[in-house]
Image (tube, helix red, strand yellow):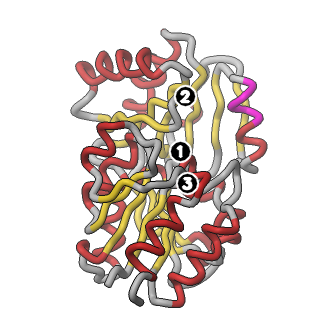
Amino acid sequence: MYQMMLSDLDETLLIGQHVPVFNQEAIREAKKHGLRFVVATGRSHRMIGDILKEIGTYDMPGEYSICFNGGLVVENKDFKILHFQGLDYKLLKKCFDYGCRENLCMLVFTLDCCYIYNPDEFEVNRKIEQKTPMKVIYDHEIEFLKNESIAKILLVKRDMNYLKKLRDEMYQDIGDQVELTFSSERYLECNAIGINKGVGLKWLADYLNIDINDTIAIGDNYNDVSMIKEAGLGACVSCAHDDIKEISDYICEKNFDEGAVKEVIETFVLKGA
């Protein structure tokens, strides 16, 4: 019997900024059967409060979230930090310099704030919609972050071929020091080396004494690959890239906005329960 399920947020669990009712109902039913439901996201814990309220785990003891692509694990009660591994400032600066060279919008996340450089109107509005603690910065001053707990930096471009070329260039330079992955068809995400959602899943499973074979993970994009591989059952939504489908144990018939999360819960948790 599966004991824990991790779900990505954007293009997996959510429609817009909300959990659709059909997913809420499926999660509530699964929890009645003993399933622990955990969001696993690239977002900050400061950005998911309303989502946790919709699935019934907000500010609850014994409920958990994995944030910053596995860099942060929190217990939802008071967002108690259980585990954090951030990005060294010198490596942040190297990633930042690539973004400056390419004149990209960049999002730098600390534990408490999102700093938006070379602001893109869409990204600023999205962070407002997500109720993200944020600050827009119009120069390239970054040294004030030297002593902050830096979680990650995103380089933004709505051109995946471009981002893949940039990733390859950065990998040649700092690929042994920074974890580079993609999300939402526009983000090149830079985390501390070795940080990914699969590592977050394993850390939380070990913390809760759950056998990794008794876990499910569902996602849609490249920053979900590690947890799809790590989980006992790895699933992806129907519109996932073909190479993500290839490494998934289960490919949903439905897309995220049609109830892919509900489909996995009904198929592997509730069926025969």
Quarter containing the N terminus = bottom left
Type of amino acid at the residue the image marks with label 1:
Glu
Instruction: Point out residue 145 in the picture as x, y percentages from the top left corner.
Output: 55, 36
Span shown in magenta: 121-125
Please tell me in which quadrant of the rendered image residue 116 appears. Answer: top right
> Closer to the camera, 177 or 49?
49
| Labelled disc at residue 143 | 2
Dot placed on the residue nearer the N-terminal end, 3 or 1: 3
Q: Is residue 212 above or below residue 130?
A: below
Instruction: Point out residue 153 in the picture as x, y percentages from the top left corner.
Output: 49, 35
Q: Residue at x 36, y 68 (%)?
A: 216
Query: Dot 3: few (<14), some (14–19), or many (≥20) neighbours within 10 Å?
Result: many
Dot placed on the residue nearer the N-terminal end, 3 or 2: 3
Type of amino acid at the residue the image marks with label 2:
Glu
Residue 122 among those drawn in magenta? yes
Secondary structure mostly seen in the magenta stretch: helix
Instruction: Point out residue 268 in the picture as x, y percentages from the top left corner.
Output: 38, 75
Q: Residue at x 51, y 31 (%)?
A: 185
| Labelled disc at residue 9 | 3
Q: What residue is shown with label 1?
A: 148
Please say if the residues under marks 2 and 1 sit with CB atoms less than 8 Å apart.
no
Instruction: Point out residue 115 in the picture as x, y percentages from the top left corner.
Output: 64, 35
Please say if the residues under marks 3 and 2 sit with CB atoms less than 8 Å apart.
no
